[in-house]
Image (tube, grey):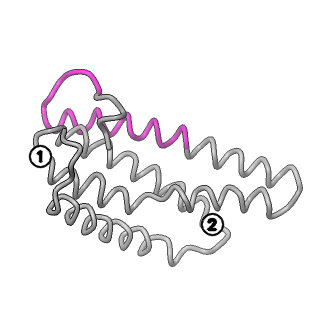
Amino acid sequence: MSSVVSVRTLGLVIAGGAVGVLAREMLLVPVDARSLPWATLAVNIAGSLLLGVVVGWLDDRHPQARAFLGTGVMGGFTTYSAFAVASAGLVGADSGVASFGAAALLIAASVLGGVVAAFVGLVIGRRIADVPGELEDPEDAR
């Protein structure tokens, strides 16, 4: 893969990002503030699964579709920063053990759930593409 990004590819990533952010916000805006960290968890796990499907399905065959759907749409749909702020907010909300435990659970579920969902998505994507073989390197999943 070339290290130079074409203007067209960049445009596809930006357009995809806008679609992903819009989809995420349509799901999260109606959510009650107390439920927002867990709704963000659900969005991030779903996004990890879908990114795995996109990467497994498209692989290197359709780089522009992968840039739009994977880097753009799924990159905009998922949100590491909201996950980080929600986790920090749970710790800062109360100095009690319960809030620390909730934050630890959110962090563990986000990281482990995202990895498992991405793995499952890669398997599904490869089956859709009917491409048997090993999973690609995480570095190539960008």
In the image, is residue 133 part of the stretch drawn in magenta?
Answer: yes
Question: Image height check: is 114 above or below 127?
Answer: below
**What separation in Å lies between label 1 and label 2 (alpha carbons)?**
38 Å
Q: Secondary structure at mark 2?
A: helix
| Residue 83 sits in quarter | bottom right
Task: Give the residue drawn at x 25%, y 41%.
Answer: 55
Question: Image height check: is 20 above or below 51?
Answer: below
Lateral position of residue 106 relative to residue 3, left or right: right
Q: Secondary structure at mark 1?
A: loop
Q: Position of residue 37 (x, y in %)?
A: 61, 61
Q: Which residues are magenta?
A: 111-135
Instruction: Specify the label residue 62 is tagged with.
Output: 1
Q: Position of residue 66 (x, y in %)?
A: 20, 50
First in sequence: mark 1 vs mark 2? 2
Q: Position of residue 106 (x, y in %)?
A: 64, 49
Q: At label 1, which amino acid type do we have?
A: His
Q: At label 2, which amino acid type do we have?
A: Ser
Q: Quadrant where the N terminus lies?
A: top left
Task: Give the residue drawn at x 80%, y 61%.
Answer: 92
Instruction: Specify the label residue 139 is tagged with.
Output: none
Lateral position of residue 40 relative to residue 78, left or right: right
User: What secondary structure do most residues of the magenta stretch adopt?
Assistant: helix
Q: Nearer the viewer, residue 1 or 26?
A: 1
Lateral position of residue 42 relative to residue 93, left or right: left
In the image, is residue 46 part of the stretch drawn in magenta?
Answer: no
Instruction: Specify the label residue 35 is tagged with.
Output: 2
Q: Nearer the viewer, residue 24 or 61?
A: 61
